[in-house]
Image (cartoon, rainbow, N blue to C red):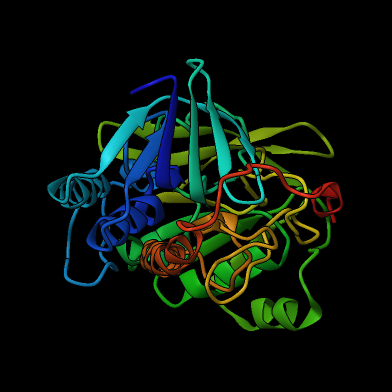
Amino acid sequence: MTEDTFYDLIIVGGGPGGLSAGIYAMRAALKTVLVEKGIHGGQVTMSDEVENYPGFTHISGSELSMKFSEHAGAYGLETITDEVTAIEPGLDCHTVKLAGGHELKSYAVIIATGGSPRKLGIPGEDEYYGKGVSYCAVCDGFFYRNKTVVVVGGGDSAAEEALYLAKIAEKVYIVHRRDALRAGMILQERIKAECRIEILWNTVPVRINADESGVCGVRLKDTQNGEERDLDTDGVFIFIGFHPNNELVPAGIRQNADGYVVTDEKCESKLPGIYAIGDLREKYARQIVVSAADGCTAALAAAHYVENKKAVPETCEIPAELLQRE
C-alpha cells in the first residue's frame, strides 16, 4: 500500500454489512478496500448460536462471520487491519485517515461501524456474553424455551423484549431499578396482563453467576435497603439502551436525536458518495440479515455513483456550508 492510495470505494467496518458491501462492490468491479481494526464479523462473532440467518438453521456466530469473510475474499477483496481515525469528505473524492499514518482516498465511502449495546458493567457480563448473557431477545430467545430468564431495564425496549420472551420462556423476571417502568402505558398494561412476567422493583443486578454450562443465576441488590440475594436463571437479557458507533461520522451528515445516521433508501447520507449501513443507520430492525441487505444496497448505489464520478477531475474539496452538522 502506498502512502496515498486511491480507490473507487472504501468500506469502514468489517461486520456483516461491511463484508456484504465488499462482495457486491467486487462483483461490480470496483477497486475496493475494507478497513477493520479488529476481527471480521463484528458483534455477531460473539454470538454462540445464530438460527435466524436465511440458509442456516443452526450456525455459530464465529462460523457465520468466517463464511462472510471467505466469500468476500473469494472475490479478491483487499482488506487492511488498522483503525480509522477520521473520514474527511471532499467534493469529488473523500479521504480516510488511518492510525498507522496512511491516508486513503476514494470516490465513495461506506461507513459500517455498527453500534453497541449499553452495558451494566458488572462481573460476568462480558465473560458470559453469548453463553447466557444477551442483548437481543429476537436473536437468542429461542434458546430459552420453557426456561427462566431475567430482563434488565424498564423502558420500551425492555418491555417489548420481555413480552417477546414471555411467549417462549416459562418465567420472565423484569429487574428494574425504580418503582415504576418508563415504558409506554400500552406496554405496561400488556406486561401486567402477562402471567409469566414478574417485575422486581427497586432492584439492580450486581453480578452474573455462572457454572461450566454458562449463566445459572444473577446476584440482585435492593436499591432501598441494600440487601442482596441470588436469583436462579438460565439467561440474562440486558436492555438499558443502544448507541451507534458514530464517532467517525463527518460533520454535515444528518443524525437523529439518538445519533443514528439518517439516509435515503440507497443508504446514502446528505453528503454525496458517503453511505451509512447496518446498526449505524436509522432503521426499524437491527438484525444480521438487515445489515447484510444494507451492504448490498449501499454497494450497488456506490457503483452507480462511481461510474458518474470517474470522469470528473479530483478536487477533494467540499463547500464549507455543507460541513455544518445538523
Residue shown at the point (78%, 63%) measured from the top left: 181
Residue shown at the point (57%, 36%) measured from the top left: 95
Q: Is residue 265 left or right of residue 170?
A: right
Residue 262, image x, y percentages: 68, 65
Above or below for 145 versus 99: below
Location of the N terminus by quadrant is top left
Residue shown at the point (78%, 75%) measured from the top left: 184
Location of the C terminus by quadrant is bottom right
Residue shown at the point (50%, 50%) measured from the top left: 107
Above or below for 309 versus 207: below
Farthest residue, direction top: 100
Residue 301, image x, y percentages: 45, 69
Q: Is residue 1 left or right of residue 231?
A: left
Above or below for 19 versus 225: below
Residue 106, image x, y percentages: 48, 44
Q: Is residue 179 left or right of residue 301?
A: right
Q: Is residue 298 or residue 3 the one in the foreground?
A: 3
Residue 304, image x, y percentages: 43, 69
